[in-house]
Image (cartoon, rainbow, N blue to C red):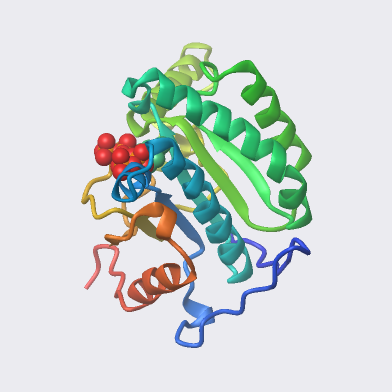
């Protein structure tokens, strides 16, 4: 599928023009981001890690706004992994409270910017207040015509694959699906990303060179851009650099 490219503004922010050195016709349709380095950003400043997460929210707002303005169809971000529960409970609790307060505060702007928000992951274990707000924000933006904004929350790539296998098995046992007809398209239709094209570009901040259980299926042919910039410092310049890097690649998809 292709995405509508709607240029909108939330009234409080100016429309950001596309930097001149970027080719509007060769923009990725879908960008995925591993937003990493909040803790190190705070540590460098002698601040608690929680301040890093709060600063990270501002970088995310900027990135979403820029992607929307620059004609990106979908932005999928890694907010909380299935492995992040292993962090100290104070940090996990802080993050859950932060997600809820930010979503509450930003929902009106998201609607004004025509953002279609979705959450990907196992949402069951999240606090009830956050779950309710997620439901409300997904439903109330479901007809939005702008950028698809997917927030991976309690998301793990392996868990997503197991879940898809279970769903296919259930349909097969019920006699609704002939197992011999399961192909890549049928499989992908059971993933959280069923309605999205695969990401063209993966950005990871903070210099770590790993996938950390993110979109294991969907990133099969994504171009990967790793920057040493810590997530709270990510901005228009660093996004433009990632896009320039992307536009310099020759995507071969196994061909010559
Ligand atoms: C990413 O920043 C945010 C989440 C994983 C929620 P980190 O919290 O991982 O920051 P670092 O990697 O410790 O610097
Ligand atoms: C990946 O970052 C998860 C998110 C950004 C939400 P982590 O900080 O959890 O990844 P590792 O531990 O460095 O692999
Ligand atoms: Mg990290």
Q: Position of residue 220 (x, y in %)?
A: 31, 50
Residue 217 in view (yes/no): no
Q: Is residue 97 left or right of residue 6?
A: left
Q: Is residue 138 above or below residue 84?
A: below
Q: Nearer the viewer, residue 17 or 41?
A: 41
**On screen, residue 234 above or below 117:** below
From the viewer's perspective, tell me whether residue 147 is left or right of residue 21.
right
Q: Which quadrant: the C terminus? A: bottom left
Q: Give the x, y percent position of residue 191.
A: 47, 35
Is residue 19 among the parts visible in the rendering?
yes
Image height check: is 124 above or below 83? above
Q: Residue at x 32, y 60 (%)?
A: 229
Q: Which of these two is toward me, 54 or 164?
A: 54
Q: In front: 2, or 86?
A: 86
Kindly identify the residue that appears in the image at 53 percent across and 47 percent down: 57
Residue 158 is situated, as x and y percent measured from the top left of the image, at 33, 29
Residue at the spot x=47%, y=67% of the render?
28
Residue ID at (60%, 69%)? 71
Is 27 situated left or right of 184 in this image? right
Residue that protrudes farthest toward the front in the picture: 46
Q: Quadrant of the N terminus?
A: bottom right
Up the image or down, 205 lies above or below 189; here it is: below
Can you tell which quarter of the image residue 181 is in?
top left
Q: Position of residue 234 (x, y in %)?
A: 43, 61
Q: Give the side of residue 238 with respect to residue 189, left or right.
A: left
């Amino acid at each position: 599928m292709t995405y509508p490219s709607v240029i909108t503004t939330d009234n409080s922010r100016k429309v950001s023009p596309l930097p001149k050195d970027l080719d509007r016709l060769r923009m990725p349709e879908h960008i995925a981001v591993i937003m990493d380095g909040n803790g190190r950003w705070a540590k460098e400043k002698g601040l608690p890690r929680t301040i890093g997460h709060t600063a990270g929210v501002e970088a995310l707002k900027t990135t979403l706004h820029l992607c929307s303005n620059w004609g990106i169809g979908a932005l999928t971000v890694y907010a909380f992994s299935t492995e992040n529960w292993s962090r100290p409970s104070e940090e996990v609790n802080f993050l859950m409270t932060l997600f809820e307060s930010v979503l509450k505060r930003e929902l009106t702007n998201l609607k004004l910017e025509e953002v279609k928000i979705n959450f990907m992951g196992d949402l069951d274990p999240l606090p009830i207040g956050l779950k309710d707000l997620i439901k409300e924000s997904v439903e109330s933006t479901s007809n939005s015509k702008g950028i698809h904004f997917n927030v991976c929350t309690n998301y793990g790539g392996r868990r997503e694959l197991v879940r898809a296998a279970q769903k296919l098995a259930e349909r097969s046992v019920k006699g609704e699906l002939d197992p011999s007809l399961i192909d890549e398209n049928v499989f992908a239709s059971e993933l959280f990303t069923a309605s999205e094209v695969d990401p063209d570009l993966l950005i990871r901040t903070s210099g770590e060179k790993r996938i950390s259980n993110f979109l294991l299926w969907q990133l099969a042919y994504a171009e990967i851009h790793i920057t040493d910039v810590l997530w709270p410092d990510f901005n228009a310049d660093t996004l433009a650099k990632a896009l320039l890097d992307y536009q310099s690649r020759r995507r071969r998809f196994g061909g010559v």
